[in-house]
Image (tube, rainbow, N blue to C red):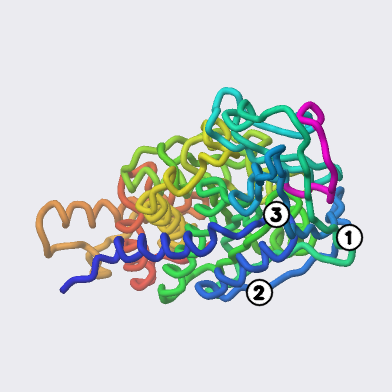
Amino acid sequence: MAVDVANLECKELEELFDRLWPITRSLTGNGVRETHNIISEYVPLERIEVACGSKAFDWTIPDEWKLNDAYVVGPDGRRIIDVADNNLHLISYSAPFKGTMSLRELDKRLHSISEQPDAIPYLTSYYDKNWGFCITQNQRDSLIEGNYQIVIDTEFIQDGSMTLSEAVLPGESEKEILISTYTCHPSMANNELSGPLASTMLYRRLAQKENRRFTYRFAYLVETVGAVAYLSLRGEHLKENLEAGLVVTCLGGAGELHYKNTVTKDTIIDRASKKALDEMEIPYQSVSFFPWGSDERQYGSPGIRLPVGMLMRGKFFEQPEYHTSLDNKDLISFTEISEAVDALETICETLELNGTFLSKIECGEPQFSQYGLYPTIGASREIELERQALMWVMALSDGEHDLIDIANLSDLKMAQLSHAVKKCVEAGILGTVK
């Protein structure tokens, strides 16, 4: 019986999702470490612990935050808000507090979304030691007058650390492709877990490939401050060795794939992503760079300017479920995530096939037949496409046009042209520039 590889991967994605979903994650703490421990069963992650209070460019790593418990007891003695029910109920990085308040006082510390009465918002207070609770608008409207007991059992650990992890998959070249994602949001299906899920499955696919041309670096970070810290540690190495990179996020929801270009919009990752998605013949949109979103803005920031784009579905920050409890398992599709991995793999393959070449024929077009290159066997259409590929490759192998250029000009597939390149190199009439 044939194995349905796609369905098997979707099943594995769902199993991994179910293990990661309940974990309370934030910028720092054991939730991130537990998440990385589980992913390490699939990807051989190397841990990086960045000390709290240390500087990373213009940023300071915040104290490690530990959530032990948090709840509100209503006038009738029942817990009406409890992080045990949903870890979005407490504003992330809330300071410890114990006390009693009237409804009027408590209401100043409550957050809801009037336009989405069934949604719990996701809020943070990373750099301001405050506290508060998030509830649905329906629950907020149902609260009665009286005294409320508040318990927030949290800790700030000054000698703690922020956890980052990476895995390097060696290739023939020291030149690298970076795949970057983040693991810092609690109970977010699309906005959090779809990125690590897709990255993990991409690693597994690439690890099975032989003769990888590039080295692949997979980074599992904390969004923003974690990417800044990672760049403070790996930035010079990446500036010297990075060929291209992608930030992977929000790939499980509805909508077309969106590729977000780098600042300059003409880097190799921009061109390779467009070529790969065009060849896949799937609906997608290419959007220009804008200075908000995810960690692509850190990789493209002044003083860094690395060729790192982003792959996502839709514009996640415009979706109504974004940063709410509605971003749950019901919102995402593991098939969509698996298909996004197809796109990521195709982009990587396009980068692998790309190169710049130089004809060894001093002047003019080579006489293909004397090198045994003129195709004569096969269906007439196959012969014609092979002939065209050979002629396009030799016509534009001037050290200036790369294979993506040739593919765009010829309307031929990268694989067809790569096959022609291989035959011309073997025949001794073509050399590699890059």
Q: Which amino acid does label 3 sit on?
A: Ser
Q: What stretch is highlighted in magenta?
A: 92-105
Pick whichever of labels 1 and 3 is earlier in the sequence: 3
User: From the viewer's perspective, is the residue at label 3 or at label 2 nearer?
Assistant: 3
In the rendered image, residue 194, in percent from the top left (x then y), is placed at: 50, 52
Question: How many other residues sit within 10 Å of disc 3, few (<14), some (14-19) or many (≥20)?
Answer: many
Looking at the image, which residue is at 87% across and 53% down?
60
SS of the residue at dot 2? strand
**Residue 394: which quarter of the image?**
bottom left
User: In front: 275, or 60?
Assistant: 60
Looking at the image, which residue is at 69% across and 72% down?
47
User: In front: 70, or 320?
Assistant: 70
Question: How many other residues sit within 10 Å of disc 2, few (<14), some (14-19) or many (≥20)?
Answer: some
Residue 97 inside the magenta-drawn segment: yes
Are discs 1 and 3 less than 8 Å apart at CB?
Answer: no
The residue to which callout 1 is attached is 54
Looking at the image, which residue is at 74% across and 57% down?
67
SS of the residue at dot 1? loop
Q: What residue type is labelled 1?
A: Ser
**Residue 175: which quarter of the image?**
bottom right
In the rendered image, residue 43, in percent from the top left (x then y), is placed at: 54, 72
In the rendered image, residue 82, in percent from the top left (x then y), is placed at: 65, 48
Question: How many other residues sit within 10 Å of disc 1, few (<14), some (14-19) or many (≥20)?
Answer: some
The residue to which callout 3 is attached is 26
